[in-house]
Amino acid sequence: VYVLDPGNSRIKCLTHDGKLMGHLATDSLLEPTSTGLAYRSSTSTFYLLDWKSKLISAFSLTNSDTSLMENSQININHQITCSAFNEPVQIALFKQHLHSLLICDSNTLLIIDSRTGDLIHKIDPRSLGIKTIKAFTIGLQDEIIIGDHHLHILSYEGKYVRQIIPTKQQQIVDVDIHIAHQPPDIIPTYYKQQHSLAANSDESKSSNSLASKGGFYTALCVDVNGLLLAGKCEKDGNAHIEIYHNHGHLLRIIDSHSQRLRRPCSLATTRDGCVLCVDLTTDSVRKYRYT
């Protein structure tokens, strides 16, 4: 697990259970203005985005042995920029279009060529009725998913496909692991069965009761099976993670009762059915089981 920590100009490397393995040797590359990080496992390539220099640096590790992480050196493959950049802050990778990058820039989405930086598509969400991009991700078929007060799905070309409307909710909490600011301090909490039973009583509530809380989506990701995980901040200050089927049905909600989520800003999933959530307010990483 790689965690971008721009405030300290470093990328932390953690095991799936939160143990600190070390930091990538990116001193000559990573700046406090580096705000976007993506990783393509098929090519073992990192993509680091710096909003100030407007550069995207593609790099790999010269030593991928996890036991020697501190000794790993980076090899910069190439750097690109795009003439359309204004203030690029986030980056995501497509699954099908392997040479395309999705960049969030001044509330606009730009699709650029990962080799040359040439602009392929420019998507203005405001023309589609989406006022603000609070979060975005890419689905398995390269559909673009945007979160504001709702969840919107666009095609790769930027055409509006549909809006995801919650129709069912089932609140569960299986495992809550809090990864502290300085790993490996991990506090596991296993909740009693009555929490799940009490939560199940809310399953019959309509989608209107869920939407009436307001709030907005601040973190999105799609797992290997096509499930959409969405971190949402409510108006009352609480936050949770919603899990949607690939057809858009709300399957369940993960709520953290003792280690309350405040501002989920990034999500990543593991192959064994867990989600890692970066909570901006508490400077922590949380781990939940969702399948």
Image (cartoon, helix red, strand yellow):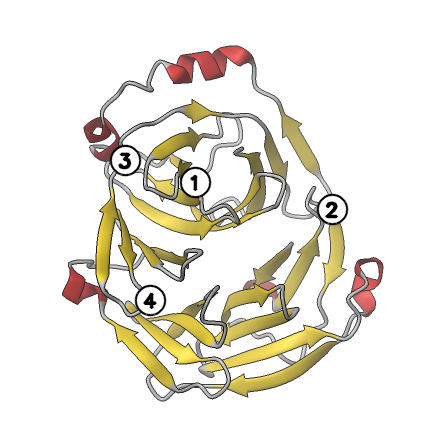
Q: Is residue 208 left or right of residue 181?
A: left
In the structure shown, which secondary structural element does the residue marked by tag 2 occupy? Answer: loop
What residue do we see at 26% from left, 21% from top? Answer: 205
What residue do we see at 51% from left, 25% from top? Answer: 173
Image quadrant in which you'd find residue 193? top right
Seen in the picture, residue 112 relative to 264 is either above or below; the reply is below
Residue 166 in sight in this render: yes
The amino acid at mark 2 is: Lys
What residue do we see at 34% from left, 55% from top? Answer: 145
Give the number of the disc on residue 156: 4
Image spot of residue 104 (x, y percent): 36, 69
What residue do we see at 54% from left, 65% from top? Answer: 38
The answer for how far apart the CA atoms under marks 3 and 4 are is: 23 Å
Mark 2 or mark 3, whichever is nearer to me: 3
- Front residue of 160/151: it is 160
Circle 4 Cα neighbour tier, 10 Å, few/some/many (<14 / 14–19 / ≥20): many
Residue 85 in sight in this render: no
Return the residue at label 2. 19
Return the residue at label 1. 262
